[in-house]
Amino acid sequence: MPGGVGSPVAPRVFAGFGRLLGAVLLLGVLPCVFGGLAGPTGELGFTLRAQVVVQDLVLTGGISSEGYQGNLPTIGSPVRDSTDFAAAVIGEFGARGALARPLGERGRGRLTFDGGLRQFSARGFELRDYSPRELSGTVDLTYLRPLGNSALGAARVRVRGRDVADRPPMPLFLQPGYRSAGGSLTGEWTPGTGSRWDAELTTETSRFLAPAFAPQIRLLDRRQGGVEVGVRPGWDMGGDLRFHLGAEVISYPGQDTFVDEDPHRRDGAVHGGAAWTWSGPVLVQLVGEGRMNRSNSRRPEYDAATLRALVSASLPAEVAVTGYVALTAKRYRFPTEFARLIPGEEANSASQAYLSFNRRLARNLDSNLRLGWTRAETEIGGQYFQRFGATLLLNYRP
């Protein structure tokens, strides 16, 4: 298969993703730079100001110190060198931004990008030290258009990817590298009863990058599609309340069910919940959500519930503090001796908590100190590791 395990196509895929990310970052930087150089009366500056608006551009750099617990098996490590505890120092650099442009009389296009590089220096393993490097990026292209006087429609195309070099053993879990492409159609409308409705159709295809020593990672390849409907009833509760209900179908073409009549794994999931947001001197958000996953293969079926809370407030000396907690309870319906093979940290099963402090240092520079904890599954499923640490970031807006 072209581009498969051990294929010479893989290095070209890596290089192509890097060029794509670089091009998108330049696209975000150049309008800002050249628009400023041309000035308000320059031809180039006028064209850029008239057609492309740089809504946001942020360059981020910083350092983290993290610890990891959980001596667990993993399908993506080249060696068996797990330990009960490992630590790492991480340097990171990233860029994110958004550009908007009018399209037609009423339409508007929007391009957003978010990419970054993280370099680890990990210690605490038995055989050797590791220096994993993670490159990730997301590009969104969205078209928005009013539909009458009380509705809005949007179409979005998204490309995501991640590369991981020198992936370490547990408990320093890093999501395997992958490529993903998808799209969505979204609509919002007000029927005139005081409520506001929204609906979204999504589709996505993900292909995981398997090194020669771990071809089984390709078993995580998946295709999925979903629908979600939400409503804001407009009740007078001193905040914004939204209920939602959704369903999705996920197929794993590389995973067998060992049933001749239905040979490939196919999951169906239903989720629903409510979110309440209050904006005042303090921002408060409370979210509760439940999820049921059923499959033609018994081993990955589960029920899960998540409670999330976020509180953000301003303090003296231009300091903003934010606290966030997400607690998830997950139960698999059937015991199994085999790996459940789920997409790791992206499996709707993580519990997280963090406390962050943000302070403005200059007109276009701010700092962020974040203390965090995460409990999440490995890609085998049903086995959890913990990560905790501190991160110091500088955010610069040119």
Image: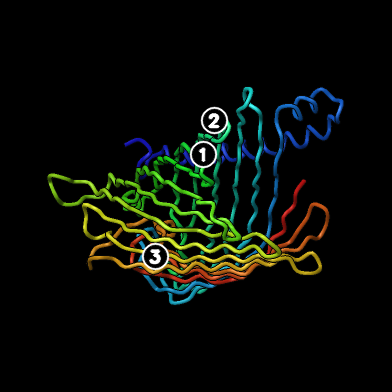
Residue 346: give x, y in percent of width and height.
Answer: 43, 56
Secondary element type, mark 2: loop
Location of residue 330 with respect to 139 vertically, above or below: below
Judge the density around disc 2: few (<14), some (14-19), many (≥20) Cα neighbours within 10 Å. some
Please name whichever residue, 303 or 391, is drawn nearer the observer in this view of the structure: 303
Please name whichever residue, 105 or 92, is drawn nearer the observer in this view of the structure: 105
Residue at the image point whose x is 60% and y is 67% from the top: 89
User: Which residue position is annotated with label 2?
Assistant: 147
**Gap between marks 2 and 3, in whole Å?**
36 Å
Residue at the image point whose x is 78% and y is 32% from the top: 34
Secondary element type, mark 3: strand
Residue 199: give x, y in percent of width and height.
Answer: 45, 42
User: Which residue position is annotated with label 3?
Assistant: 305
Residue at the image point whose x is 28% and y is 50% from the top: 267
Looking at numbered disc 3 in the image, what kind of residue is underneath it?
Ala
Name the N-terminal-most of marks 1 and 2: 2
Name the N-terminal-most of marks 1 and 3: 1
- Find the residue positioned furthest to the front: 193
Looking at numbered disc 1 in the image, what kind of residue is underneath it?
Trp
User: Which residue position is annotated with label 1?
Assistant: 189
Residue 310: give x, y in percent of width and height.
Answer: 58, 65
Looking at numbered disc 2 in the image, what kind of residue is underneath it?
Leu
Please name whichever residue, 203 or 211, is drawn nearer the observer in this view of the structure: 203
